[in-house]
Amino acid sequence: MTEVLYHWIGGGPVAGTSERTAPVHDPALGVVSKQVRLGSAADVDTAVGAAKEAFATWGRTSIARRSQVVFAFRELLNARKDELAQILTSEHGKVLSDAGGEIARGLEVVEFACAMPQLTKGAYSLGVSTDVDVYSIKEPLGVVGIITPFNFPAMVPLWFAPIAIACGNTVVLKPSEKDPSSANWLAALWAEAGLPAGVLNVVHGDKEAVDALLTHDDVASISFVGSTPIARYVYETGTAHGKRVQALGGAKNHMLVLPDADLDLVADSAVNAGFGSAGERCMAISVVVAVDPVGDDLVDKIRDRMGKLVVGDGRRSCDMGPLITREHRDKVAGYLDVAATDGAEVVVDGREVEIDGAAEGFWLGPTLIDKVPTTSTVYTDEIFGPVLSVVRVASYDEGVALINGGPYGNGTAIFTNDGGAARQFMLDVEVGMVGVNVPIPVPVAYHSFGGWKASLFGDAKAYGPHGVDFFTREKAITSRWLDPSHGGINLGFPQNQ
Ligand code: NAD
């Protein structure tokens, strides 16, 4: 009998009303490892009900007690992160060291959330008028929905849930149905850390569960991460239903290489950022923009490094694992045909890779495509696989125009030894996260993560100060403790005196 993964509602596993399921694969073995329940609107309603009930207490629990739970969760997660890494690798396919990196970045946000007493301190203005004080406080929103993608099954839930919880909200998490187990593992760990039942609930599912969350009257906000078309849909539907929404979408990240750059550093960075996690990262570099005349040398250096990468089962110390599903693998591989048709030069064809793993796994090796026309879908689509494109440009200005001309604005990087050029790039580029000689500029937890344009709908980025603002609403209180004298009747607009 194949194991069936249940939802986690009100403090424990719940089968739910819907018997629909989806297969979960071990992508390195190419086999179905379990089935996951796909929740119905009724299941979402049950979870929201549990969260609403828990909010009545959790929202009023002291910030000291809430922080103690987050601290305890941090200790448990740190102690048991290897267990989580095994789950991530077995369902996502990323290699174990990369799974460890994902958890480390999630832990950073947990640590940030431990400081919530400091982060949610209000402001107080004494004596704004005679005997009048004004103060502002941050209150939790209530029940918040979190909907996450397959590519960071632990880190992305950890971008949101610890901050939401520390701020006093209660959560319904709808993780990706492709690699759902880490969500239940994290929910159980929160329970072990002392989080009361109902504060964090997990409903597995697909569009049906997402739609139920987006339209539920008792859900105050939605935090979404996924592809751009769904992010746009989530933003439009959620806001139309009166919710606060932050919806992070897809990306096509460019690395601009100026002629004075250290080409060995550039080649290392392009390989790391292009092929880490098999390119299934929203901050992966997918286009190298080489300013003349460095293109030929750079392509040679990247190709040499690619030859040394070991592709295989992430549990075997390989550099790169498989893709998430067979369909996704085939879709990504299809761009090699497109490249040939569109007149690009396939330098390394990932379909020919040798694998350290099971033949049935969803494999595609690192792929390098040079001289990609910017009209080709190899350039315009977010491929989300181990495919690195090279585009040649004649100047810095042409490179920046190319980057700014695209629909996305998630991450980008410039490689140069010229500080003035780097500074100019930082100002010129219309992208939310910028690296200077850093290929994957994911901000640390006390800054905020998010792109521009079609990479983020809404005005709040994830975690950091934006995260705290998103998961709280501010109340300003104007208070007067009367001295025994009265001001008398005055119908005029209040003025400070
Ligand atoms: P996806 O958009 O297919 O799925 C994301 C979530 O939406 C999942 O929980 C899924 O169940 C749900 N969903 C899917 N189809 C839906 C529909 N029609 N209606 C309602 N909900 C639906 O994304 P994915 O394939 O899981 O993840 C990869 C994508 O996520 C890439 O585009 C990547 O760039 C993006 N991503 C962005 C960031 C960022 O921070 N900007 C981070 C990670 C991933």
Image (tube, rainbow, N blue to C red):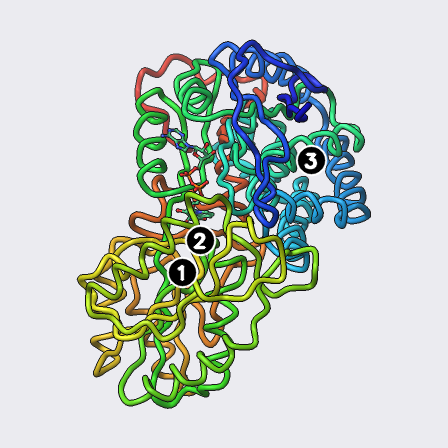
Mark 2 lies on residue = 282
Residue 225 point in image, percent of width and height: 45, 41
Q: Residue 411 carries which label?
A: 1
Cβ of disc 3 within 8 Å of ligand 1?
no
Q: Which residue is drawn at 20% across and 70% down?
A: 343
Whether label 2 lies within 8 Å of ligand 1 gets the answer yes
**Image position, residue 221 (x, y; %):** 46, 27
Is 85 left or right of 148, judged from the image as shown? right
Compute the Cα span from label 1 to label 2: 8 Å
Q: What residue type is labelled 1?
A: Gly
Q: Which mark is residue 320?
A: none
Q: Check the image and report above or below for 141 versus 299.
A: above
Determine contact: label 1, label 2, CB under 8 Å. yes
Which badge, 3 or 1, comes first in the chain's sequence? Answer: 3
Q: Is mark 1 on a helix, strand or loop?
A: strand
Looking at the rendering, which quadrant does residue 210 occupy? top left
Q: Where is residue 385 in the image (x, y as percent from the top left)?
A: 43, 56
Most foreground residue, 3 or 169: 3
The residue to which callout 3 is attached is: 186
Q: Which quarter of the image is occupied by the N terminus? A: top right
Left or right of 40? Residue 168 is: right
Q: Mark 2 to mark 3: distance in Å?
A: 22 Å
The amino acid type of the residue labelled 3 equals: Leu
Looking at the rendered structure, the secondary structure element under dot 3 is: helix
Q: Is residue 138 visible?
A: yes
